[in-house]
Amino acid sequence: MMTETIAAISTPLGEGGIAVIRVSGETAVQEVERIFHSKTKLTEVKSHTVNYGYIVDPDTNEQIEEVLITVMLAPRSYTMEDVVEINVHGGVVSMRRVMELLLKLEIRVAEPGEFTKRAFLNGRIDLSQAEAVMDLIRSKSDRAFDVAMKQAQGQLSKRIKDLRHTLVETLAHIEVNIDYPEHDVDELTSNFIQEKCGHVMAEIDKLLKTASEGKILREGIMTAIVGRPNVGKSSLLNALAQDNKAIVTDIPGTTRDVIEEMITINGIPLRLLDTAGIRETNDVVERIGVERSRTALQDADLVLFVVNNNEPLQADEREWLQQIEGRQVIIIVNKMDLPNQLDEQELAALAGRFPIVKMSAMLQDGIDALESAISDLFFSGKVESNDATYVSNVRHIGLLHKARRSLQEAVEASQAGIPIDIMQIDVRTGWELLGEIVGDSVGESLIDQIFSQFCLGK
Amino acid sequence: MPFVAGEYDVIVVGAGHAGCESALASARMGCNTLLLTINLDMVAFMPCNPSIGGPAKGHVVREIDALGGEMGRNIDKTYIQMRMLNTGKGPAVHALRAQADKFLYQHQMKETIENTPNLTLRQGMVEELIVEDGRCVGVEAKGGAQYFAKAVVVTTGTYLRGKVIVGELIYESGPNNQQPSLKLSESLKNLGLELVRFKTGTPPRVHGDTIDFSKTEIQPGDDKPKFFSYETKHADNEQLPCWLTYTSADTHEIINSNLDRAPMFSGVIEGTGPRYCPSIEDKIVRFADKPKHQIFLEPEGKNTREYYVQGLSTSMPEDVQLRILRSIPGLEKVEMMRTGYAIEYDAVVPTQLWPSLETKKVDGLFTAGQINGTSGYEEAAGQGLMAGINAARKVQGKEPVILSRSQGYIGVLIDDLVTKGTNEPYRLLTSRAEYRLLLRHDNADLRLTPTGREIGLITDERFAAFEEKVSLIEQETARLKETRVRPDETVQAMLQEANSAPLVNGIDALTLLRRPELSYAHIESLYPSPLPLDEDMKEQVEIQVKYAGYIDKQLIQVERLQKMEKKRIPEDIDYSLIHGLAMEAKQKMDRIRPLSIGQASRIAGVTPADISILLVYLEHYNRVTAKKHAETDAG
């Protein structure tokens, strides 16, 4: 495990233009060289040099990004292994594409705190720091775990689980053929296995396609739109979405549900959540909506708090503003096209350090001001996306690619007449890689499957 | 009245498949060994199916043989049928399976034991372990005979508080109406060992003269049998066939209408039974839509007419068993000779063992076989061998031998038991091994003979033959690599014959052999080897060449695993002091007390983050310790 080459984005998302991707491990230089196009070969450059060139997708020969690459050879690097740092300039989207390309190679996403762990184990970090290193690993892992748990309930997770089920059924069948050769279970034909693998591969292709369109990707600044009923939250969402060409509208639901939109503002990915009105209610359905909006609010990196210009400030709005702490808020005074009823001075006092933007979502007026308020916060580093979500998404894409490749190899092996138990190795690898996405790769479940699917025994 | 009856280096309690291997290994390693059994006529008895081997299990028998154990030699001398299974699949899952003459098998094993120097075989029921200062120093048998030793191996199978169940009939008994061991359980519990209740079962036996074989399908043995032991070069045992028939609609009807009398469903049976060895009533209830189930009729020996009815394990009442039997085509007039039964017994929770099979609680006390929650003769024998080896090594002051998961199925088996535990009787399956392609049946000797030699269980003669084999395989592989195949007429004709694409350019013979449709025989027909190769060696060359790509992939994974296995965890580590370790991980690791990072990472509930934190802690621990040593040395 220690020798595997790992990669991670080592600058927080949202530091503006430049992002650094760090790759570390025995094969770091060779692997990155496979997607680097330049006059000089990375494998031949001296340590601690900066090299200019392009990242190119080896499958399509498409130039992904102009980059500067720093090579630091062992032991003179942070981890004391060979380290390659890729400076990407083109913002979040191209950084993501570079990361995805890396993960198609023999590179995996670093575990939380893994660079530091390696630095420590290789003797780079002082003994006295051991406890701090352990703390770092714990806290980063716990955070990643929380994110993973959230994702485990999502659509992606359900689809992956279905695919895994198809594979584990096939695997169980192969295993029964092997471990119970005299049992009256049909011998699996290679056609059947090719068909099953083919089906899963096609589904993975669909997932990857939607991933590249951003449909299953949930990364970005989690932005909650909050406010009392009828202050114009939905029209704000629509206005932002229209103006910024929504990439996706994918969460179905009633008006009481959280509605979600992915948009980008000046290259910053935003995940917009419109929540049902925050107020106490006895209506069960509505209460569910409210519960969800509370959760959405909990998770948000940025809150857009909408108040109505045409109405005096309400008690619960005051309360809310007084309670809100520890997060970034932009206050939006909506419905500026209607007569003013709001005490602006009181609002300003309550707002404190939060910016106030006046607009009319109906008339699409003031959207620009809101957009620049958002990018100001983002580029000043006041708002940070939950990068664990981001990392887990690139990681998923990498795993999907690798799982697909394994299944492809199984199909090819099967076509070449390789025996079933050997081809099984690749099917099983595919199943395990998909398992890493949903956080479940335990071999015992295969054995459970064998005994629940087939009637065996003496 | 207790009296001193003898002093030994190692005592083995129980002479089943685990006990026999334990005692033989210990004695052969030079330890003065005592083997105690409740009944001297039951040495190496097969209480269930009269067969040895099959997928994973057959692999274990070959591993036992490569390590210098007895099971392979014993079955080669006493088989009445030999079949290679899975020949239509890849080499990793080919598996040898033998039908044994179960009486001959016992006699042969007893004879070997009686003729082994340093080994005393004695009848006696052990009722208590003698423990002083946390060390097991001997045993006391019924009647007061006390035997003392430096290490004790307990291999009591299903005898501990055994309870036999046949319908409404329930009585205390070991397998096949043997005396159960009632007091030893108590002794183990008093030592602080946690026990668990498991259940297994066996089918009825019938008289062969009352079977109408014309209604069944014959299942003969192989014309050219292969053998389990690498020492067996030739054997011409007469082979007997097995016979296949099926349950009928009547069978299912009889079972369904008598479920109220089935102990499996009435709540009488408390023990956990294995999923892979369900009783017929269980199969019919759980897989109700399956119209029929296979039944194999297996002869129990040459000099008996008794047949084992495989597939019909049951604890239904005796009258129902007879009706079930007679509802099966071919068995309409059958005479039942013994009823099937379920048996419940106590087993030791295996996570209380070190990977050496020594208990963590009591120094010098080892357990092996079914008492550790496994099922199957082969699983028992594999553990017995390792426990015997490690008990002897303990007496001799040597480090235990622990096989890794990449070295053999025995390694997989023991690691699973001591690291993960089991909540049902554990059966080996090839799918439990991560590196199935490396753990082949054909290469067990290549994997393990050097270990067997180091342990001291492989003779000079056998080791010389082994080294010769290794060398010839290497030479032949090198020769193939150097042999140039040109696209001339003979070559193209051979390729056409074999349905293989014609050559365009010359290539080496080794590369040509990689083509799936070609075998070593094809290459040999063109370029015969000057080396004295036997069939096994040719097979070995072919497998190593053909599957090199896959084998190499697994070897890389093994290398990674090995790094984690080599990172040792000090035995006195205090997990509660490790900052940042999750509570669940602390508890689990404290209970299992893994010996290496590799083992720790396989404990259920321990996450990669926990492993990272443990690694950092150990690094810190080691550097501090090293520093202290340096200071002490300097001071």
Image: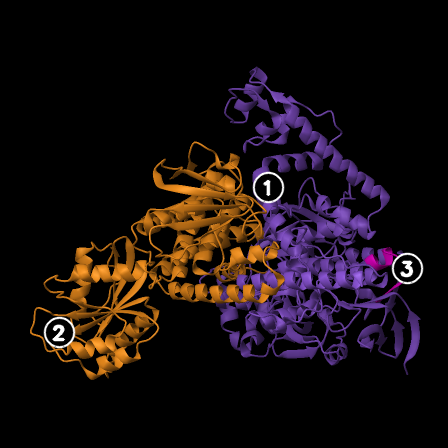
On the image, numbered disc 2 is attached to which residue?
Answer: A309
Do marks 2 and 3 share a chain? no
Q: In this structure image, what is the colour of chain A?
A: orange
Which residue appears at 54% of the width and 19% of the height?
Answer: B492
Disc 1 vs disc 3: Cβ atoms closer than 8 Å? no
* Left or right of B554 on screen, residue A198: left
| Residue kind at label 1, given as amino acid type | Asp
Q: Which mark is residue B480?
A: none
On the image, numbered disc 1 is attached to which residue?
Answer: B552
In this view, the residue in front, B131 or A315, is A315
Tell me the crowding category of disc 1: few under 14, some 14 to 19, or many 20 or more residues within 10 angstroms, Cα based.
few
Quadrant where the C terminus of chain A sits is: bottom right
Q: Quadrant of residue B517?
A: top right
Q: Quadrant of residue B188?
A: bottom right
Q: Which residues are magenta?
A: B24-35
User: Whole-percent x and y of residue A65?
Assistant: 35, 42
User: Whole-percent x and y of residue A291?
Assistant: 30, 76
- Residue under mark 1: which chain is it in? B
| Residue kind at label 3, given as amino acid type | Asn
Chain ID, purple in image: B
Do marks 2 and 1 share a chain? no
In this view, the residue in front, B465 or A109, is A109
- Residue under mark 3: which chain is it in? B
* Left or right of B265 on screen, residue B397: right
Q: CA distance from mark 2 to mark 3?
A: 100 Å
Q: Is residue A359 above or below residue A196?
A: below
On the image, numbered disc 3 is attached to which residue?
Answer: B118
Tell me the crowding category of disc 2: few under 14, some 14 to 19, or many 20 or more residues within 10 angstroms, Cα based.
many
